[in-house]
Image (cartoon, rainbow, N blue to C red):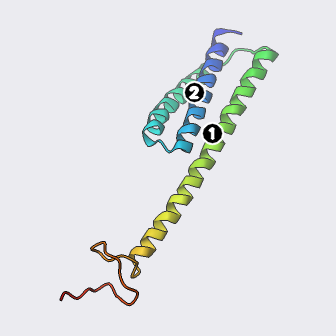
Amino acid sequence: MNETLRTERDVLKQLLATLQAEQEALVRFSPERLAELGQSKLALLEQLSAVKRNGTDSATPGSKKELDWLTNAVRQTHRANGALIDTGLRYTRRALATLHAGANSNGIYGPDGQARSSGESRARVSV
């Protein structure tokens, strides 16, 4: 395997590891870690793009197979992460809608944090 192919393979391996770490950060909901990984992912994609621009020399069947496997693993992990993000966004949107609906109804608690009686409205009369 020549130097260009080794570089491509190494960058793909690093990208796969980064995507796997991103997946764990998504599951654990770690925004700080996601921000770090996003920067790493961008740098690796730029590296990969540069390697591809320089052109890959002819690969042996074995090295071609390894590169194809890594590329497919990166693609699948990226899609799985996208599905996790989509699920998280749907959950967040539903939670926000519930909170907004509760804020627009009489609710259980008044603005002072005290429980309302069943007949009490939002407007409170001071005695």
Asked if residue 72 is positioned above or below residue 91 in the image, the reply reads: above
Mark identifier at residue 66: none
Q: Classify residue 118 as left or right of residue 65.
A: left
Q: Dot 2, how many residues are within 10 Å of its Cα: few (below 14), some (14-19), or many (20+)?
A: few
Do labels 1 and 2 touch, CB within 8 Å?
Answer: no
Residue lying furthest top: 2
Q: Dot 1, how many residues are within 10 Å of its Cα: few (below 14), some (14-19), or many (20+)?
A: some
Looking at marks 1 and 2 on the same chain, the residue that comes earlier in the sequence is marked by 2
Res 32 → quadrant: top left
Task: Name the residue tied to disc 1.
Answer: 78
Task: Name the residue tied to disc 2.
Answer: 49
Q: Label 1, label 2: how many angstroms apart (C-alpha)?
A: 17 Å
> Which residue is rendered at x = 56% and y = 49% of the image?
85
Q: Nearer the viewer, mark 1 or mark 2?
A: 1
Res 66 → quadrant: top right
Three-letter residue code for mark 1:
His
**Which x, y percent locates residue 59?**
75, 15
